[in-house]
Amino acid sequence: MTHPEEHLSGYVDGTLATDERAEVDAHLATCATCREEIELATRAVTMLRELPEVPVPFGTTRSVIAEAGKARTSRARRSWGGRTQWAAGLAAAAVLVAVVAVALPRVGREAGTESAGGAGAAASPARAPGMEAATSGAVHLELQPNADYDAAKLERLADASAHRAGFDATLAAPSVKDASAAQAEGAASCLAKPGGLSGEDRLVRLIQATFQGRPAYLGVYLENPGSGQPADRIVIWVVARRDCSILSFSSKRL
Amino acid sequence: MPSEERDEDLVRRAVDGDRAAFRIIVERHERRVYNLALRMTGREEDARDATQDAFLMALRKLASFRGEAAFTTWLHRVTVNTCYDLLRKRSRTPLLSTAEDREPEPPAWPDHADATDLSIDVQRALLAVPEDYRVVMILHDVQDLPYEDVAAIVGIPVGTVKSRLHRGRVALARALRGRPERERPEPAGPSDEARSR
């Protein structure tokens, strides 16, 4: 027996045309299976419609709105020079300086010094427990020529970043050498383009590798919701080295 | 009043860098986005993460929104994809955090009066339904979107939406009744028989 499955939801919803409904009625008269399913489906709909709408927990979208502010600054920076947006331009320039300030002093230091103290610590407005080493130490551009990330590895990187001050050595091949200052600056600038950075977010790791075969930069950031609140998320942005377009991102609540 | 502005106008302003416009978009839609994520994932924490990720992705892709579809359709699509990504990444059975430690109780039809218990039962049953069926039920039966919008959000034909909706509803009702899902059971006689199990 052929069951008019496509019409059964409409039958329950009362959206069938008169002739379609008559066809289903005729079928139901001879098909106990469909009669039972209509009864089940009707009960399911009743209960689904009674599910309460749950209020959004306070603060859920605060970081998103803060992010929107940063994106605005980033856009303004890109358009600076073409228009007379002085205020926006100055703000954008400040962000650019901040980006370079984060990246440059940390380039050229010896590898494996992430746990060393640094000038960045004092400037940090937010500090998550367990993240001191990552936030206060040097942030190199790590070259990982043999590492190819994907969504699962990105998730593991976010997990590892959120749960400890160091990083999971099994995530990828170890860095082979430090990059030049120019490379680090380029990577940081490339990562800053899509979303923009605010002075309150902290770059804690900068990686050059591939993402699903495409040459990419990975930036691991500690983000805070603003207003001096402690950092509450690790966010990893992956951008293409070629044009700085976003390839992927991952986030993890601390 | 800004709150009465059309979504498409707000999007245009947001793309031009108007932070206030994006805030209005978020405040206008966060409830639907969060509830969609909550029903899809079954965990408050996951729903919060999915909501944030969905709006972050929306923010990044806002400039690519062309207006061919309604903004709400587009945002729902982003949210659904975010939920799928989250469920795939975590690859674990999502459960309501408030019900994690509860043993499944296979009652007869849940005619108990406690609405909270009932909604937890329904949520748990929802999670027992395959994701592809679950999403169309949430969008259509919970969020009251028409078949056509559900089809556009999920990216499937309207006829497939209707079929999945029916299969999902039946699976949900069977899960609620503590019966394993089965495809097209043998004719079981009148519905009273089913109720007595």
Image: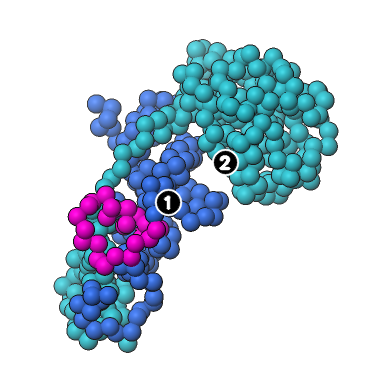
Q: Residues within 10 Å of mark 2 (few under 14, many from 20)?
A: many
Q: How far from the left and from the top, in percent, is residue B103?
A: 39, 58
Coordinates of residue B154 in the picture (x, y in percent): 41, 56
- Secondary structure at badge 2 equals strand
> Which chain contains the residue that carries disc 2?
A
Residue displayed at 29% across by 84% down:
B187
The reply to whether residue A224 is visible in this rendering is yes
A102 or A87: nearer the viewer: A102
Disc 1: CA contacts within 10 A as few (<14), some (14-19) or many (>=20): few
Quarter where residue A179 is shown: top right
Residue at label 2? A250
Q: Locate the N terminus of chain A by quadrant.
A: bottom left
Numbered badge on residue B3: none
Label 1 SS? loop
- Which disc, if any, is residue B100? 1
Which quadrant holds the C terminus of chain A? top right
Chain letter corresponding to the colour blue:
B
Give, as a three-letter code, the residue at label 1: Glu
Q: Which residues are magenta?
A: B103-127
Q: Position of residue A104 (x, y in %)?
A: 73, 20
Q: Residue at x 25, y 62 (%)?
A: B110
Q: Is residue A4 on the magenta stretch?
A: no
Front label number (2 vs 1): 1
